[in-house]
Image (cartoon, rainbow, N blue to C red):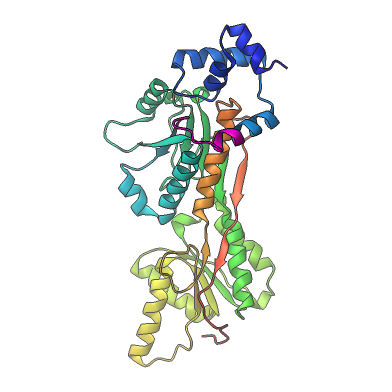
Amino acid sequence: MPNQRELAKRLGMSQSTVSLALRGSPLIAQATRERVRAAAAAMGYAPHPMVASLMERIRTARAVKDAGCIAILVDFPDKQAWFDFHLAYRQQYEAIERRAGKRGYRTECFFLQAPGMSPAVIDRILHARGIVGVILAGPRTATSIDGPAMAWERYAWIKSGYTWEGARMDCVSADNRQHVELAFAELARRGRRRVGYCISRRMVPRANNNWVAGYLIAQRRLPAAARIPMFVTDPTPAGQARFARWLRRWRPDAIIGGMTEQAWLAQWASDATATGHDNGTPPEFCVRWRWPGGTTCSIEENAPVIGETLCDLLLEKIIHNERGLPAHPRTVLIQGTWHEPHLPPLTGRI
């Protein structure tokens, strides 16, 4: 296998020029970078993993002014709308930015829903600026990119989560199935044996169906008498009425759900107090995602770790000159952690 020195000799360039070109450095002209990458592919050049790792350690041990730019493609109109939609998106972005900065890279966001933007326009911008690494940030709903509009072979790619449809590339995601299994196990540790599970209808197919898979696996581990049918939420008055009937029918010790069900549960308990109807002790509530200031048990998604991993894997691709979509995409799952307020174990039930 040829080494970098042989590649430089074949091209009539210095080894440092070849090295910078292969890493997509903006210090090297775009035409030169493309020429070097084409020659490397033709000669079958691939960086030695141990040497590449050593050089990366050496580079990160000293300040690097500008190693290049990482593009972040976002399916929102602007950064504020993106951050407002979910705290995890802001946390992932900030982690990507910090991690990239430590390695001398800048980040720039490109918003697919911004005026005048489209995959084709963004592709032209990325190519003109010599950007070779792209992260697809987690979108709001199932989203796809127009394949012919993007020159996939020009860039190293990685995506956050499963929601980008049709984009067969390496992926970093929260381990949502593990989140649900963990919540069931920890609630059982707190003395809760009959645990109900709520999920909104739009979330059922999300995350590669892992929200539902976690529930089904947890149910199989319970005795038959402790199993409670999953409640699928519709955020409507009729859905709230169905939720109240589900509570009275199954009498769970605890509920795993989202913000909608948490509000409904509080309303249900308040109505019972106002009418003098004794519904018993309300079930303990566990929120699927931890939010700042939350007072209930919850699952910490570890969004900053997802962001760091996205950045690390993308830079690994850039260093190894890996461009285009992989034949066999990999998925890296980041496990969640249990967050429990300082509350005593609960034993009552409704």
- Please state which of residues 205 and 159 is positioned toward the viewer in this rendering: 159
The residue depicted at 44 percent of the width and 32 percent of the height is: 65
Give the x, y percent position of residue 325: 56, 29
Residue 199 falls left or right of residue 313: left
Q: Is residue 329 visible?
A: yes
Residue depicted at x 60% and y 77%: 194
Looking at the rendered structure, the number of numbered marks drawn on it comes to: 0
Q: Residue at x 56, y 84 (%)?
A: 346
Relative to 66, residue 81 above or below = below
Please report the bounds of the magenta region as a residue range. 57-69
Query: Is residue 206 something one can see in this rendering?
Result: no
**Which residue is the extreme one toward the right?**
1
Q: Nearer the viewer, residue 320 or 161?
A: 320
Residue shown at 47% from the left, 48% from the top? 95
Residue 325 position (above or below residue 259): above
Q: Magenta stretch: residue 66 in it?
A: yes
Q: Residue 342: percent from the left, percent from the top? A: 51, 78
Quadrant placement of the N terminus: top right
On screen, residue 270 versus residue 46, left or right, reads left
As drawn, 182 above or below 29 = below
